[in-house]
Amino acid sequence: MLQVRFDGRFDGWRQAARDLLHRGIAPHHVEWLAGDEAGGLFGGHVAPEPIEPSSPVRIPRQLLAELETAARFRTADRWSLLYRILWRVAKGDQTARLVGDADGSELHARIKTIRREMHHLHAFLRFSPITCPSGPDYAAWFEPAHDILTGAAPHFAERMGLHSWLIATPDDAVLWDGDVMHYANPCPAIWRRLAQTAQESGAELWKTYYESTFNPARLNRDVLQNNLPVRFWKNLPEGPLIPQLMSHARAGAQRDGQAERVATRPGKRIERTGQA
């Protein structure tokens, strides 16, 4: 078994994988060690034995894009799956990329998960203004399930004009200075504190609006939790309200087509018309 250590990033893996392909090292002979990850039962780093170089390998550009996306999926075998697919395609087995293949199916499932997690970041991340003169204009804290930050962050650079902003996670962070995006892994402690302590001045107003517009008559718990997973609630201004509003709906508030505090006010009552 050959232990191949790299920096834990896709570019580092790609360079190592290219060298292994060139040397003709099959996937079942390789143990991937990312960053400071401890090795298995085979001791420390072992370099591949030099052999007669093979002919140049051409890999489809689309496959590299798919592998890069799937590499963001956090799991113990993320790098070994990528190399196994890469090896099979390099040997002429294009079925490794297809959904009907075991490896291909896992590849596309991971890509789908990563894209959904990026959507979650775009939808549920909340920036708060920063008053510190030397800090960015806005900061946000987010806890993704996978390594999506560098892939998802350009979305905000394209939409926030010349404003500077910071997104920090438990593992890494990006800082956009209005012109250049700076990436840090691990997340610097000062960036973490800045993102976690940022306060949105309009948070209370937003919570009041959210509570007033919540429609208990149309509550569907499964749909809500599928589109807004529970793990994100704690970092949303309205998050603490959701369990209470759901509890009121189950306790009978679903007969009304508006929040309880609105339903008790004078005026025409909006009765329940159905459940979505």
Image (cartoon, grey):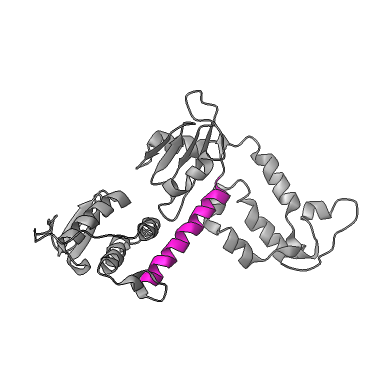
Q: Is residue 113 magenta?
A: yes
Q: Is residue 72 magenta?
A: no
Give the dominant element type of the magenta stretch: helix, strand or loop: helix
Q: Judge left or right: residue 272 versus residue 220.
A: right
x then y, percent, for residue 171? 38, 46
- Furthest residue in direction top, as rendered: 133
Relative to 27, is 196 above or below?
above
x then y, percent, for residue 264? 84, 54
Image quadrant in which you'd find residue 98: bottom left
65 or 269, which lies in front? 65
Relative to 68, is 135 above or below?
above
Image quadrant in which you'd find residue 186: top left
x then y, percent, for residue 236? 58, 48
31 or 169, which lies in front? 31
- Is residue 9 shown to the viewer in this render? no
147 or 179, which lies in front? 179
Q: Judge left or right: residue 17 versus residue 274.
A: left
For the record, the magenta segment spans 104-125
- Residue drawn at point x = 49 percent, y = 56 percent: 117
- Residue drawn at point x = 84 percent, y = 63 percent: 271
Relative to 89, is 35 above or below?
above
x then y, percent, for residue 208? 72, 45
Q: Quadrant of the C terminus?
A: bottom right
- Residue drawn at point x = 72 percent, y = 55 percent: 214
Q: Judge left or right: residue 170 versus residue 9.
A: right
Q: Quadrant of the N terminus?
A: bottom left
